[in-house]
Image: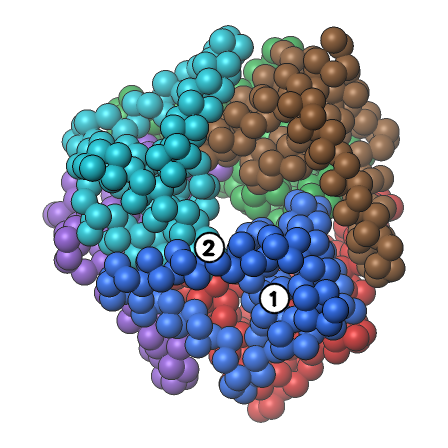
Chain colours: A blue, B red, C green, D brown, E purple, F cyan
Amino acid sequence: MAKAIDEFNQYREEMDQRILRSEHLGIKRFFALDHQAYEDGVLDSKTKELLGLVASIVLRCDDCITYHVLQCVKQGVKREEFLEVFNVALVVGGSITIPHLRRGFERLDAAIEDVQP
Amino acid sequence: MAKAIDEFNQYREEMDQRILRSEHLGIKRFFALDHQAYEDGVLDSKTKELLGLVASIVLRCDDCITYHVLQCVKQGVKREEFLEVFNVALVVGGSITIPHLRRGFERLDAAIEDVQP
Amino acid sequence: MAKAIDEFNQYREEMDQRILRSEHLGIKRFFALDHQAYEDGVLDSKTKELLGLVASIVLRCDDCITYHVLQCVKQGVKREEFLEVFNVALVVGGSITIPHLRRGFERLDAAIEDVQP
Amino acid sequence: MAKAIDEFNQYREEMDQRILRSEHLGIKRFFALDHQAYEDGVLDSKTKELLGLVASIVLRCDDCITYHVLQCVKQGVKREEFLEVFNVALVVGGSITIPHLRRGFERLDAAIEDVQP
Amino acid sequence: MAKAIDEFNQYREEMDQRILRSEHLGIKRFFALDHQAYEDGVLDSKTKELLGLVASIVLRCDDCITYHVLQCVKQGVKREEFLEVFNVALVVGGSITIPHLRRGFERLDAAIEDVQP
Amino acid sequence: MAKAIDEFNQYREEMDQRILRSEHLGIKRFFALDHQAYEDGVLDSKTKELLGLVASIVLRCDDCITYHVLQCVKQGVKREEFLEVFNVALVVGGSITIPHLRRGFERLDAAIEDVQP
């Protein structure tokens, strides 16, 4: 599973570079805005990553969930905090989010193990 | 506009009572879970309301946005913090969320005025 | 409210006729397919209207909900049966469907009154 | 393919247990509500599973479709009835649901074979 | 109805100015990207507005549909071309888009009248 | 990757034939409408395929994206034109579409290689 995360990160980076090398100005600027949206500001980066995670779950995007789970783990989000975010997402988004929560849990356990073995 | 918020609150309460009076156990329990999801826990209530707001914007539900804007104002969320949540939602959800942000801004200004006239 | 339903029906019919008079063959055929999908078959029309209703709620389309609530009332669906469909939709689609359930309840009460005053 | 269904069931059960062992009360209660929504009531369990299936298709969730196809087969839903549910879902949800219908058909054939070899 | 379009344009402009005056850099840049995405490039502005229209219909956003209908009329898109875009959107997005097509047709007729009285 | 496209095409054709052999009249007619929507008309087939592509991206359906990328390549859509469609889709649909754009880029490169080696 740590392997699954490595593969995700590698594919993500490789494709993002391929997209950015295509030199479309609009797309490059969008990627910059996306990056900046989660930087420390009036709200700190950790809170913003939690926002990104809940948005990813209710919109049901597995890759986005994996990405924000990893970012949240880096920001020191604890397992108990993840559970509360998952709960808000589950109540807002309904049972249709459950398959994504299953994969999110799997990614979370692997990511926490990686960081705190 | 403060009038618009009053009407929203009144309709919301009246219909929720009508729904709960219908005595369907599953629906009643869902409404209880929905309420509890935003209570103080490992994450505080303010953070959870921000989560509810961002989820409402990316899922593009005007009534849900109005509700969570009001809850956030009650929790003391400042205008600058709202802007950063709106920005995350806009980047994640795209320009299709803009009409909802327009109405969200309108509700926000009215709600802040009400509380801090 | 019965008035709200009358207005909905009138607008719906008027616009559908305007759309069909535009003589686009693909659109006309789609409207025919849409109509036929709810006719008696291996599953009866009542069951298919329940399917249409639950799909409309989880996809959060107020006009579609109003339409299928009216069709279900015509098919003799009882208030207790509506509650169970609403409950499935609420669990599958989450709290984001609640504003649509509020309006669905309002339409339902008005529609039942109309038919069984 | 029967193997694919076995793997799906195994992963689903394993992850659901891991999620429930995490002891978050809100999540546990949601899972209970989800289970109860499909039990016999004023509408029978078979009809409710059809509702769950159509909701899963229009919301385009492959795992949810697989799950409800299996439940429907257990409830004795016949191939002809599945086709009519697929048709309602296709008309309501549009051609964007077709890739999910392809996988749904594949699961359905495998599931029917398993039960009635 | 021409009045409805005037009111839409006025509200849209007023709120966009209020949002931009809030001086959040990320939001301002997003609005600029949104504007630039429809400018003449390798694809001309007319084709891009058609893309914006079909995306707005399948995502079921009334305000976005109104906006792109108006832009398309300005670009000289003819009624017959609109019908073909509506047809693609209807087939891809399903009957759940029909209420939005009704309102889209209404806006279209009003917009064409305004421009070619 | 050319292999991935071959497998996609083979699975797609096999399942579509299985679905059509099931002889449900509504489903067969829907598949015919779907096919006809992209034929030359007032708008040419190339423009309609671009519409199908942008709709597939904002609705986030990988298989639909692959299909329309292939159709667009057949219609002679150039890499620079794809980039502008991707940009419109990214702005309208937000960062949640990025994982689909990654896979879309991968398919695009493979498809162009196949056709213009």
Looking at the rendered structure, the secondary structure element under dot 2 is helix
Instruction: Give the quarter of the figure containing the N terminus of chain F.
Output: top left
Q: Is residue E29 above or below residue D45?
A: below
Q: Chain of mark 1?
A: A
Please give the residue where the numbered disc 1 appears in the rendered image: A70
Q: Residue furthest bottom?
A: B117
Q: Residue at image x 43%, y 69%?
A: A34
Q: Residue at image x 41%, y 47%?
A: F103
Give the x, y percent position of residue E1: 31, 51
**Residue C69 or F73: which is nearer the viewer?**
F73
Residue count near mark 1 (Cα–Cα under 10 Å), binned few <14, some 14–19, many ≥20: many
Is residue B72 toward the left or the right of residue B58 in the image?
A: right
User: Nearer the observer, disc 2 or disc 1?
Assistant: 2
Give the x, y percent position of residue F77: 20, 41
Q: Distance between the Cα atoms at labels 2 and 1?
A: 15 Å
Give the x, y percent position of residue F68: 33, 36
Identity, as a three-letter code, of the amino acid under mark 2: Tyr
Identity, as a three-letter code, of the amino acid under mark 1: Leu
Task: Give whichever of discs 2 and 1 has the lower sequence position.
Answer: 2
Instruction: Give the quarter of the figure containing the C terminus of chain F.
Output: top left
**Residue C59 or E7: which is nearer the viewer?**
C59
Please give the residue where the numbered disc 2 appears in the rendered image: A11
Same subunit, tags 2 and 1: yes
